[in-house]
Image (cartoon, rainbow, N blue to C red):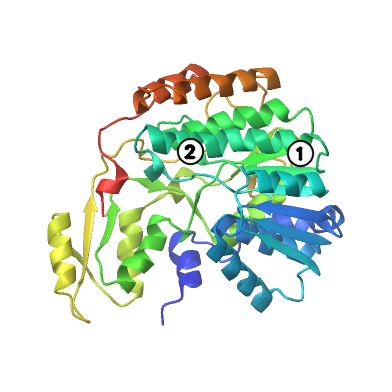
Amino acid sequence: MFDLKNFISSRITHRAESLFLTDVERNHFHLYDEIRGKSVLVIGGAGTIGSSFIKALLPFKPGALTVVDYNENGLTELTRDLRSSYNELLPEDFTTYPFDFGGPVFEKLIASSRFEVVACFAAHKHVRSEKDHLAIEAMIRNNVFNTQRLLELLSQSPPQHFFAVSTDKAANPVNVMGASKKLMEKVLLAYAAKFKIVTARFANVAFSNGSLLYGFEERMRKQQPLSAPKDVRRYFVSPEESGQLCLLACILGESGDIFFPKLDEGQMQTFSSIATQYLQDRGLIAQNAQSEEEARALAREYQPGDPYPVYFFDSNTSGEKLYEEFYTASDTLDVERFEGLGVVHGQAEIDIGQVAKVQRDFETLFAESDVTKEKIVSLLGRYLDDFKHQETGQKLDDRL
């Protein structure tokens, strides 16, 4: 019988134990002292990483847990999952709120509460979100402006620990999502002198909600072909590891730290190789189609026991890096402090006053009647020297 958790550990991460197990064990008492009895706010907590963070947090016995996510169905499932598996660890003061962290109701929550630990996972996190000026405006508002507004709200009564998730795609960004997160990092570092602020650049989280690998499960359930690039290589962590990474960074990091998993280049994998292994572990053989049309036709005719249709292709979509990286040549690194984690020592490049100017510049551009994707990309480039947008005219939404 196919076991997804076992497939992730044996075929994707190739780790029987978590990459961060040693760091969690070595710092157990420190984590316990910093979390026990504390009031914790998790924003975007219904997603894969946010919920994994919560599961990593609960054994250290927070005194109160508040989870905010605009995905009401996701919050419902999170509550059911935690009540079913972690009920004995849930604090009596456990509350979920289905609203947006950029809205007025969220502002009332912050004004009426005192949180000692705040972790934010709310973000546009897919390269697929790069479509036109409307999609990009929404991404920048969420990833940059909402984060800045959150920092301003928290500045009135700063938490002891604040964490916001970034992305590997912020290192030498070639897509707008990565650029928006790199700009978010600049905003975080501008506030890092006011209170403790930490972030992390991520590997892909295997089978996380909305990811390509998660899509494999959905495609098979609906008897649709598997489709994946054969030349794109990525690092992977398990959902459990993603939660531990964020918890360690949030609690143990120093203000301005940017964490990343210590993985070497040989651990990157292609999506097509994972797809082939995924079918094999389900007792199936991949049948390679030469086009999307052929793959769809084969799927319509598929019968149990037949080879399963797949379509593997060379990537040509805008902003799709062929490989993953967590830091640049100019970054100052610390790879000695933790066993499974490296740290970039972030340096503030703009101050809070300049952050306000950045926002005004984008608001002015967004208000123009003739705003275009190209104009937004150009403005991002003014604030991000290392942003080299990769435009091919092809979107991920044009793929299976």
With respect to residue 310, does 140 lie above or below?
A: above
| Image coordinates for residue 5, horizontal then vertical, percent | 50, 70
Q: What residue would you read off at disc 2?
A: 139
Q: Nearer the viewer, residue 22 or 3?
A: 3
**Observer-nearest of 57 and 81:** 81
Q: Residue at x 81, y 70 (%)?
A: 92
| Residue at (61, 61) in percent of width and height | 51
Q: Quadrant of residue 57?
A: bottom right
Q: Position of residue 16 (x, y in %)?
A: 56, 66
- Pick the quarter of the image with the N terminus: bottom left
Location of the C terminus (image quadrant): bottom left
Q: Is residue 10 above or below residue 119?
A: below
Q: Give the CA distance from mark 2 to mark 1.
A: 22 Å
Front residue of 112/357: it is 112
**Rendering coords of residue 43 (x, y %):** 65, 51
- Secondary element under disc 2, as helix, strand or loop, is helix
Q: Is residue 152 left or right of residue 175?
A: right
The residue wearing badge 1 is 154
Q: Amino acid at mark 1?
A: Leu
Amino acid at dot 2: Met
In percent of width and height, residue 148 lies at: 65, 33
| Circle 1 SS class | helix
